[in-house]
Amino acid sequence: MNAETQQLTNDFLRIVYYPLVKLDKTDVTLVTLFKFACIIALVFLCERLVRRFLILRFLQRTHFHPSMQYAISKIGGYLILALGFYVALRLVGIDLSSLAVVAGALGVGLGFGLQNIISNFFSGLIILAERPIAIGDRVELGEVAGLITQINMRSTSVLTNDNITVIVPNTDFITAKVTNWSYGDPKVRLRVPIGVAYGTDIDRLRQLLLEVAHQHPMVLREPAPEVFFAGFGDSSLNFELGVWTAEMTSKPRRFRSDLNFAIERILRDNQIEIPFPQRDLHLRSGHFILQAPPSAPGPDLAKAA
């Protein structure tokens, strides 16, 4: 029994210490890989603990903006991971100089095969450093509009007003045109277009539109609302109601919809017409004959026939 146990132990040790790969003077075995995996797991655990309990608590005592605190903590976490990988390789006895050729070959292959992932990773670093967008900002990117809830290494999560999370690659926020309603001062001016019929009392219209703006609780009093005469249309006089608000960062569609409902209601109550498109037909020459359609024969004529 002791001989069999000893044989099994020797076989197990022979397997776990069998050199899988030889890097310069170091043999990579299963034991080496197990040690490396354990150290990497500890590195990730330490990174999370340091970022959560040390960096975040320290930054909360500063006067940095919350988005800046998040960016610093993310970049600090990446530095901890990079240092942890370096220490893990050294502890398992792998000489980094022996990996130079292998790393160069892998770098060329990864550069072609993982080009988009690498591009998104560095775009994420640029976002965290320059902060064109931050957690809690309301952005519009193409057909995606919502609040930024998370910025990761490869992508950014955007939560729409329909409670749908859209995952957007970080590269899109660097290369595409992005509207950030929360960047700097969240106060913005919204222009609501209105078209009324020719002959409308425009002074009365201006008074009614300003009344709608002053009655809405989300319209700012300063700067004051304004009414702009945009121009003469084919079928209408075109105006714009300009109001200042901070609601574009949270409920833009609801705010615009409330204003449209209120404007339609007050125009209807005051008999101000919102015209349909109209066209005038002018006959310059010739004759235009109107002819009634032939009528069906009466009952007497049908009986006589």
Image: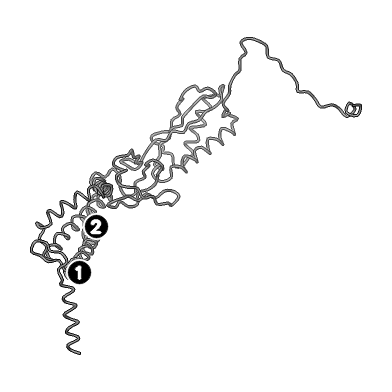
Evaluate whether residue 128 shows in this view: no
Return the residue nearer the eye: 270 or 31. Answer: 31
Q: Nearer the viewer, residue 173 or 220?
A: 173
Residue 266 position within the rendered picture, expressed as x and y whole percent measured from the top left: 56, 34
Local crowd at mark 2 within 10 Å, few (<14), some, or many (≥20)? some
Residue ID at (50%, 32%): 209
Depicted 105 relative to depicted 294: above or below = below
Q: Who's the residue at 19% across and 85% down the image?
A: 5
Q: Is residue 181 left or right of residue 296?
A: left
Which image quarter is the C terminus in?
Answer: top right
Instruction: Please name the amino acid that badge 2 sits on.
Output: Leu
Residue 278 in percent (x, y) is at 58, 23
Residue at position x 25%, y 52% from top?
Answer: 69
Of mark 2 and mark 1, the one earlier in the sequence is: 1
Q: Residue furthest bottom?
A: 1
The answer to whether 159 appears left or right of 304 in the picture is left
Q: CA distance from mark 2 to mark 1?
A: 32 Å
Q: Quadrant of residue 95?
A: bottom left
Secondary structure type for disc 1: helix
Q: Quadrant of residue 270?
A: top right
In the image shown, does 158 or 188 lie closer to the viewer? Answer: 158
In which image quadrant can residue 22 be found? bottom left
Image quadrant holding the N terminus, namely bottom left
Q: Could you tell me which residue is drawn at 23 percent across and 64 percent down?
A: 45
Check residue 56 in the rendering and tell me which mark sits there, or answer none.
2
Which amino acid type corresponds to the residue marked 1 in the rendered image? Phe
Residue beneath label 1, please?
34
Badge number at residue 156:
none
From the viewer's perspective, is 211 left or right of 34? Answer: right
Q: Residue furthest top?
A: 285
